[in-house]
Structure formats: structure tokens, C-alpha cells
Amino acid sequence: MSITSPPSTQPEEDQPGPQPVPQEISAGRASLYRGFGPLLRRLHFYAGILVAPFLILVALTGLAYAFTPQIDQVAYHDQLHVNTVGTTRLPLSQQVAAAQQVVPAGTLAAIHPAAAPDATTKVEFSLPELGDKQRTVYLDPYTGQVRGLLTTWSGATPITTWLDQMHANLNLGDTGRLYSELAASWLWVLVLGGLILWWRQQRGTRTARRLLLPETTAGKGVRRTRSLHATAGIWLALMLLFLSATGLTWSQHAGAKFDLLSATLNSDNIPLTTGLGATGPSAGDSKHHGSGGTTRTQADLDAIAASVETSRLSGPVTITPADEPGHAWTVAQTDNTWPVHRDKIAVHPHTGQIIDTVRWADQPPLAKLTTFGIQAHMGVLFGFANQIALALVAAGLIVTIGWGYRMWWQRRPTRHSHRYRLGTPPPRGTWRHLPIPALVITALAALAVGWAVPILGWTLLGFLILDAALALARHAQSHPATAQEPK
């Protein structure tokens, strides 16, 4: 069921209708050319219009989140830094005891010893009323003076937490996560589809100059806008595909499929063995050295700190109590800037004996790549250069979308018909030109992608149903039933 396009003031070359098959294409490929091209153009047209607002939100919130390290330094300077760098730090047990006095009802959740001479030590406590967040005490490691108290999430400050959740789910919880997954799911489709369309557009005159640089000789119409939109997309394509892929790895639905694939390929992170066995004092014993108050497990914090020195874990580390009695505490490097350091050790809570060690170098390649991708996506892996790159990509994506909407606006009909007042879509029904084998392969590929990226699959199905319903409605309006005269 095809659509008859209304008259438009745009030049014929800019109309989105069927294009003639170039003579250089063989007859065997002609049906593929007539089918895939318009089909892809229609998909790109509608997906661009409907998904672009979500992409703009993702770009804006991601742009803000990329610079949270600098924002934190300004907003929380007093909490993150000491006034005077001393010569000798207090034992870790005394630091934690000082923090516990500030949150006496809290359960020790994690300790982040000062990672730099002018940095504070961060001690996190869980409280029932905070849910998955923590109350974090910032204190001077040289004097034990409390520098501040904040409600954090996985060590992130309130501002960073708010921007992170804004980027991930618009601060709407699990329901809001659908917006970012929708954007990430469609981004790669839009990018790859746009690249193919621009490649086809340049057939016969295809050169690196015409593909990579906008047409400076074009006027101010849709041809020039399309050139700007397409060439900007080419320059951004690699990074956009990277951001789409890495964003999907920890999304709600596609992320679950990725985890399944990783487990199938035995590429999960090597787990740390924390069981203490039946001999020796357990993590649940009452022995206690200076941790104060109510902790999840009582331990000799100074012995654990000594094990960090013994194992040569450099850079920032996080010390985490055992989840249950009979298990070791864990100490993990959290240096995510290149070159990454993420070694882990399991430490006996009373003797400081190292029970198990997992080196970052021994992790499976896919697990490493996933970590690298996530940290680069967050703007951490390559430091400030990483942040600048993300900012340029986010700004470029917003501008490219703006040119896409401008092209859509320039193509709108301006006379005779109000049927397509928002622009003429590429014709439907072009899939009929596809050979049966190609149609079957396309359908199977769509099903596979829909399984791997469920949000993409469901929204694509919804689009097809809506498109078919609109086609039926317009067909009924164009061909009203005529009542027959009685004989």
C-alpha cells in the first residue's frame, strides 16, 4: 500500500520518492536496490523524527555528567581535601572510629583511604532509611578531623549521583531507564542507516571529498542541509556506535542479553574467593580493634591496611566488609584511568592474611574490553581528553539532529495539500521489490536483533503496526465504499 506524495515546492531531486535504478547496477541487483534503499530511507526518516528527542536528552545529560569530576572539586572541595598535608597518617582504625562517632547507628559499608597527600579518607555507612545510598564521612587522615558528611551512592557525591541518574533514567527509576535504552538501541540503527544512505546518494560521483566534506557549492535549501547532516554524521559515526554499544552493555534489557552472552563465552570477571573455611577465627567473631559502633563485621582494620601495603595495591582502593560471617574482607583497586589498575585481594578480617588475589592482567579479554568501554563512556579512561572528546561528540550529535530536523522542515509541503503538513515520508510498500530470499534473511535478522536488543524490537514492531494502521485508514479515506442503487 503505497503513499502518493502531495505536491511540494521543493526541487524534484530532493523528493523522497522512488529513485531510478542506475544503469551500472545489474538486473540481478535491481530488485534489491529498489527494495532496500527506500525501506532504509523510510526507517531512517521515522526513527530520526521519533527517537531524536531522546537522543538530545541523552546527549545533554551525558555532556553534563562527563564533567562531574570538575564539578565535584568546586562543590565539595572542603569534603574532598585537607587544609594542611601532614607527615604521618593516623592508623585506619582510628580514622574509622572517628567517622563512626558521627554516624553511630550506621553499619560500615566501605572505606576509601586517602589516595593522594591532600585527599580525605571516605568512610561509608549504611542506614535503613537511605535504601541503596550511604552516609559518607569525610575526614582528615592526619588529624581525624571530620571535614564533611554527605549522602552518597556507591561513593558518588550528591551532584554526581543526580546527574548520573538523570542521564540513566531522568531520575524516574526503572521506568525512566527505558528512555536511555531506547536512545542507545536506535542510535546505531540511525548511524549505520545514515551512512548507507549517504553512500548510495553519492553513487556515480563518489569521492572521499564528496563523502567527508559538505557541499560548499550547494544553495541554502535541503541539498545543503542534507550534506551538512550526512558529513557530520560520518565524522561522528565511530564514536556514536561506540557509545551506543557501551551504553547497551549495562542497560536493563539489552544488558541482560549481554550478560548471558558473556557467561556463555566464559568471559565474566574472575570472582574473588572469600570463604575462610572452618579453621581460625571467623569474620563473625566478636574480636574488634578500633572500628567502633555497629559494623557489619568486626575486624582488625590496621591489619587489613597492612595487607594493602604487602600486596602493593597502588592508587585508590576500596575496602569492603564481608557480607556475612565466615568470609574475608575485600580490597579492590579503583584506578580506572589508563593504564587501568583493578587488582583485588581477599583479606582475613583479624589476621590480615591474604586469602586470595585476582590480578587485572588475568581477567578475560571481553571483561577487560567491557570495563574499558564503560570507563571511556563515562569520561574516565583517558582523563580530561576523554571528557573533551565526549563533549564534542555530544555537541556534534545535537547539531546533527538539528540539521536533520531542519531538512525535515525544508521538505514539508507548503501548498495544495495539508495531508502531509509535517513532511512527506518515503513511500511504504517498497519491501515488495525484495526477492523472497532477501526478504526472509531480512526478517530473520530483524528477529535476531529484536531478541538481542528488546527495546529496539518492540518499538520497531510498534512502528510497523502503527504504520500499517495509518495505511489502512488512508486507503479507506481514498477509496470510500459506494452504496449500490437498488434495482
Image: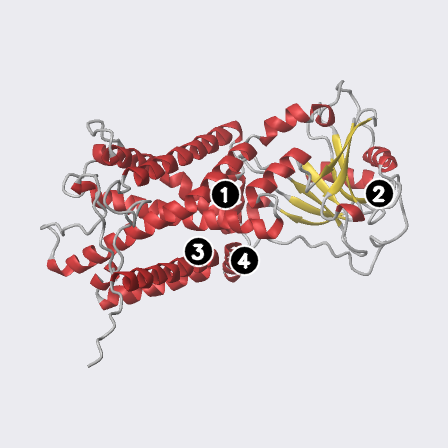
Across and down, in percent, residue 414 comes to: 26, 40
Mark 3 or mark 1, whichever is nearer to me? 3
In-image side of 399 versus 427 (left or right): right
What separation in Å lies between label 1 and label 4 (alpha carbons)?
17 Å
Q: Would you call the spot at circle 2 few (<14 residues within 10 Å), some (14-19), or many (20 or more)?
A: some
What separation in Å lies between label 3 and label 1 (alpha carbons)?
21 Å
Figure quadrant of the N terminus: bottom left
The reply to whether dot 2 and dot 4 touch (C-beta < 8 Å) is no
Q: Which residue is mark 3?
A: 456
Q: Would you call the spot at circle 4 few (<14 residues within 10 Å), some (14-19), or many (20 or more)?
A: some
Mark 3 or mark 2, whichever is nearer to me? 3
Give above or below for 247 relative to 148.
Answer: below
In terms of image quadrants, where is residue 428? bottom left
Give above or below for 470 relative to 196.
Answer: below
The three-letter code of the residue at mark 2 reads: Asp
| Residue 449 visible in the snapshot | no
Across and down, in percent, residue 38 comes to: 24, 53
What separation in Å lies between label 3 and label 4 (alpha carbons)?
14 Å
In terms of image quadrants, where is residue 339? top right
Sequence order check, earlier mark of 1 and 4: 4
What secondary structure is found at the residue carrying circle 3?
A: helix
Q: Which residue is mark 1?
A: 373
The three-letter code of the residue at mark 3 reads: Leu
Q: Which residue is mark 4?
A: 256
Mark 1 or mark 4, whichever is nearer to me? 4
Q: Which residue is mark 2?
A: 300
The reply to whether dot 3 and dot 4 touch (C-beta < 8 Å) is no
What secondary structure is found at the residue carrying circle 1?
A: helix
The three-letter code of the residue at mark 1 reads: Gly
